[in-house]
């Protein structure tokens, strides 16, 4: 495959991916490095970060074209996955549009700011870190001429309720998740229980119960969550806000979440 053919199917790529492509032609690493340097100098490629390149579209320059942030996020580590608020935004399901992208990876990723976008690495929960699929709920989707690895709606729901700070806080999380019309509830429950956090179980159970009619939640969906909810009352989050004790989740839920009072001033 000629380099131009590779560039046509790889709008953002890594050095290693290009080396793998060149290996088919029995070319040396030095030759591949020279070619990449040549294409960058010629304005056909933009060097985003050491080892990551973006193809410059015809008629544009490396200084003016915008690299797609989702394609870039997927290339920041070998196992990089677009996650949390960014995963919902990828699918057009967020209340607010951000220029901060969460990248799920086992690696200790150095933050990157590029073309006005910020990319921040987040490690998966410790219980999932050694699993080959990062705990599941990760898909690869064709997008903008390349591919993006992104968490499913189901994993994203649980991840945001587990780590709401990565979703912009409770109002942003609630409003964004409410834009999703359908969840595979069995997948939601399976992944929730995999995390092994009673507090997250309770938050997920509360969210599903609150949206029971809209999401077609039935008792058999909630039963395994009830069985793994906290045994003693727990505050909704570390802020320890006053609220109402909601059973059977044993959660002290703040009134603003319980009644979604932010909707009154929208």
Image: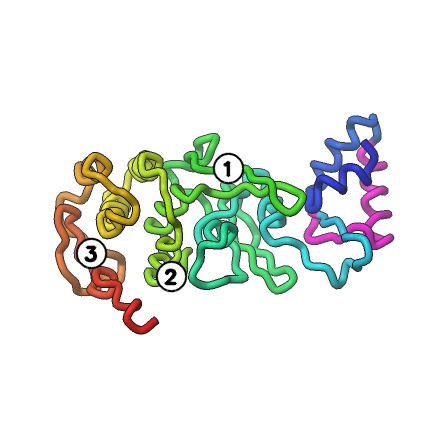
Residue under pointer 3: 235
Residue under pointer 1: 139
Q: Is residue 205 left or right of residue 59?
A: left
Q: Is residue 96 above or below residue 37?
A: below
Frontmost of labels 2 and 3 is 2
Q: Name the residue nearer the viewer: 28 or 222.
A: 222
- The residue depicted at 70 percent of the width and 41 percent of the height is 10
Frontmost of labels 1 and 3 is 1
Q: Name the residue nearer the viewer: 235 or 9.
A: 9
Q: Is residue 19 above or below residue 255?
A: above
- Give the magenta range: 28-52
- The residue depicted at 26 percent of the width and 57 percent of the height is 237
Distance, label 2 to label 3, CA atoms, is 20 Å
- The residue depicted at 75 percent of the width and 34 percent of the height is 19
Sequence order check, earlier mark of 1 and 2: 1
Q: Quadrant of residue 116?
A: bottom right
Q: Is residue 201 above or below residue 263?
A: above
Sequence order check, earlier mark of 1 and 3: 1
């Amino acid at each position: 495959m000629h380099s131009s053919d590779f560039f046509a199917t790889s709008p953002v790529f890594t050095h290693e991916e290009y080396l793998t492509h060149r290996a088919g032609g029995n070319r040396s690493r030095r030759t591949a490095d020279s070619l990449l340097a040549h294409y960058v100098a010629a304005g056909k490629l933009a060097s985003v970060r050491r080892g990551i390149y973006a193809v410059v579209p015809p008629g544009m320059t490396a200084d003016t074209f915008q690299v797609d942030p989702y394609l870039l996020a997927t290339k920041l580590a070998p196992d990089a996955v677009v996650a949390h608020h960014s995963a919902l935004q990828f699918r057009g399901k967020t209340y607010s549009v951000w220029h901060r992208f969460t990248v799920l990876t086992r690696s200790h990723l150095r933050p990157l700011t590029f073309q006005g976008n910020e990319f921040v690495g987040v490690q998966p929960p410790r219980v999932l870190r050694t699993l080959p699929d990062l705990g599941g709920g990760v898909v690869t989707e064709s997008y903008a001429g390349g591919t993006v690895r992104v968490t499913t709606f189901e994993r994203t729901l649980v991840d945001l309720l587990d780590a709401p700070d990565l979703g912009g806080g409770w109002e942003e999380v609630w409003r964004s998740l409410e834009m999703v019309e359908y969840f595979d509830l069995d997948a939601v429950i399976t992944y929730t229980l995999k995390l092994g956090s009673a507090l997250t179980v309770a938050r997920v159970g509360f969210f599903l119960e609150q949206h029971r009619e809209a999401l077609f939640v039935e008792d058999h969906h909630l039963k395994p969550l009830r069985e793994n909810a906290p045994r003693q009352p727990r505050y909704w989050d570390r802020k320890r806000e006053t609220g109402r004790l909601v059973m059977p989740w044993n959660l002290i839920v703040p009134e603003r979440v319980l009644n979604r009072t932010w909707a009154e001033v929208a």
